[in-house]
């Protein structure tokens, strides 16, 4: 009898260890994800077969784990009941139920799963060969269980087919944000990763230089006059037009005129030196435009609207800046789009994109009617505002600072700390009172 009790305790300990192994394996495999498995496959080529076995059918592997876990837990409960009955008689049944509940929950579930969360890669690598061998031992039972599950799924019209594990854009963005918060990823790295993710969906009109800000020259402009344009603006390329900017006929490259300048032929009209222009629709995705510009080996494209008029232009630099941020060379004289002043207010360019403004000021600026701060102000006012007018957007006071040629060039944004979030705003963001402080 004493030997039976000792043997029972040894078997019970082994079964609890097996329960912990299966629980840890389940958690580790659930956490690891398809991308990390592919990385482990490259890092540990000797584990390639077992990792491919898991990647081929993760649902099958989890079924193997669940079968094993339930088998050892049931067996452990039976052995514990037998040992307790030998030690305590009829009272042993209640003692076995209470004791095994505590032991299985702590040592068979909580503790191994907690360890697996911290060391899931190592546990996956160790557990897979054992699980693969165990799957052959329980193959008949596994096949029977899967047939029953599929049959029940067919009855209730449930989709239980195992599928590949996909990572969505939203999940990647959340992982990047978590990585930045934990210090694993720098802020600049996070911004670049978000730029790469959004690159596929961004449209040309969202990043183009608008028509009103374009620098272009007429076809009859002499080379001498064009040189002054290159000198004043620091551009290496400018569009050439006939009659008006809606009729772009080509692009003038500064490198094409160097030889002519050296020869002293400054009276030649630029239309004789222009190159063919690339025209693209404003709704084109910038990822597609990048491929086109790379294949055609051009660095500038003219953006046209749905009516065939010129909407603006876009350069290869504009595309790259969507990923790496602002690129400024020695000729750039650009001031920051958002400039914080000593009094805590912000001087903001009117053409800044609302998404960029939201990121800079850590507040969600949005409008169904506009894409820029200038457009947002126009939607708030309902008419063209005058310099010095104030508007309210949530907790922000917006003052029109500079207006030129029917464009809002610059505005001052001040956070009003004691202002209620929606004071003076209706559901679409317009000023309810239509009374703006001057």
Image (cartoon, rainbow, N blue to C red):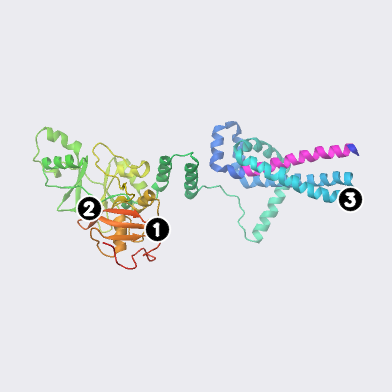
Sooner in the amino-acid sequence: mark 1 or mark 3: 3
Q: Quadrant of residue 383 in the image? A: bottom left
- Reading the image, the residue beneath label 2 is 212
Is residue 45 in view from this perspective?
A: yes
CB under 8 Å between discs 2 and 3: no
Q: Residues within 10 Å of mark 2 (few under 14, many from 20)?
A: few
In the current view of this chain or complex, which residue is farthest to the bottom? 433
Query: Which of the two discs, 1 and 3, sits closer to the camera?
Result: 1
Disc 2/disc 3 C-alpha distance (Å): 93 Å
Disc 1/disc 2 C-alpha distance (Å): 38 Å
Number of numbered tags placed on the structure image: 3
- Reading the image, the residue beneath label 1 is 418
Q: Quadrant of residue 273 in the image? A: top left
Disc 1/disc 3 C-alpha distance (Å): 72 Å
Q: Secondary structure at mark 3?
A: helix
- Magenta stretch contains residue 16: yes
Q: Name the dominant secondary structure of the magenta segment.
A: helix
Q: Work out whether residue 153 or residue 416 is closer to the camera in this orientation and state it.
A: 416
Q: Residues within 10 Å of mark 1 (few under 14, many from 20)?
A: few
- Magenta stretch contains residue 363: no
- Judge left or right: residue 32 versus residue 172: right
Q: Which residues are magenta?
A: 3-28
Sooner in the amino-acid sequence: mark 1 or mark 2: 2
Q: Secondary structure at mark 2?
A: helix
Give coordinates of residue 404: x percent, y percent: 20, 55
- Judge left or right: residue 17 versus residue 435: right
Q: Quadrant of the N terminus?
A: top right
Query: Which of the two discs, 1 and 2, sits closer to the camera?
Result: 1
- Reading the image, the residue beneath label 3 is 90
Residue in view at x 33 percent, y 44 percent: 319
């Amino acid at each position: 009898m004493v030997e039976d009790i000792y043997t029972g305790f040894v078997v019970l300990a082994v079964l609890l260890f097996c329960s912990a192994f299966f629980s840890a394996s389940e958690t580790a495999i659930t956490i690891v994800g398809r991308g990390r498995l592919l990385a482990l496959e490259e890092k540990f080529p000797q584990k390639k077969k077992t990792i491919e076995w898991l990647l081929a059918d993760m649902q099958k592997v989890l079924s193997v784990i669940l079968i094993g876990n339930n088998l050892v837990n049931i067996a452990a409960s039976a052995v514990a009941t037998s040992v307790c009955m030998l030690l305590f008689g009829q009272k042993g049944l209640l003692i076995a139920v209470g004791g095994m509940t505590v032991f299985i929950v702590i040592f068979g579930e909580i503790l191994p799963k907690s360890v697996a969360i911290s060391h899931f890669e190592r546990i996956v690598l160790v557990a897979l060969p054992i699980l693969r061998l165990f799957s052959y031992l329980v193959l008949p039972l596994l096949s029977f269980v899967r047939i029953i599950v599929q049959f029940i799924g067919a009855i209730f019209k449930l989709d239980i087919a195992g599928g590949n594990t996909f990572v969505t854009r939203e999940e990647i963005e959340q992982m990047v944000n978590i990585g930045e918060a934990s210090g694993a990823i720098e802020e600049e790295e996070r911004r670049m990763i978000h730029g790469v993710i959004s690159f596929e969906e961004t449209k040309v009109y969202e990043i183009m230089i608008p028509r009103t800000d374009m620098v272009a020259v007429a076809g009859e402009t002499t080379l001498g006059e064009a040189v002054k344009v290159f000198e004043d603006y620091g551009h290496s390329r400018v569009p050439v037009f006939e009659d008006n900017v809606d009729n772009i006929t080509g692009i003038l490259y500064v490198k094409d005129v160097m030889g002519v300048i050296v020869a002293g032929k400054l009276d030649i009209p630029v239309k004789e030196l222009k190159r063919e222009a690339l025209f693209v629709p404003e709704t084109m995705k910038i990822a597609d435009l990048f491929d086109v510009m790379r294949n055609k080996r051009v660095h500038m494209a003219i953006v046209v609207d749905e009516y065939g008029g010129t909407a603006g232009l876009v350069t290869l630099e504009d595309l790259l800046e969507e990923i790496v941020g602002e690129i400024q060379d020695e000729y750039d004289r650009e001031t920051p789009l958002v400039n914080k002043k000593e009094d805590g207010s912000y001087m903001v360019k009117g053409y800044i994109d609302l998404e960029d403004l939201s990121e800079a000021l850590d507040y969600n600026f949005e409008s169904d009617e506009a894409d820029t701060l200038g457009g947002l102000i126009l939607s708030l006012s309902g008419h063209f505002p005058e310099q010095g007018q104030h508007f309210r957007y949530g907790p922000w006071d917006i003052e029109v600072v500079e207006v030129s040629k029917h464009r809002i060039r610059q505005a001052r944004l001040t956070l009003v700390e004691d202002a209620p979030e929606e004071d003076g705003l209706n559901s679409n963001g317009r000023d309810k009172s239509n009374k703006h402080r001057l």
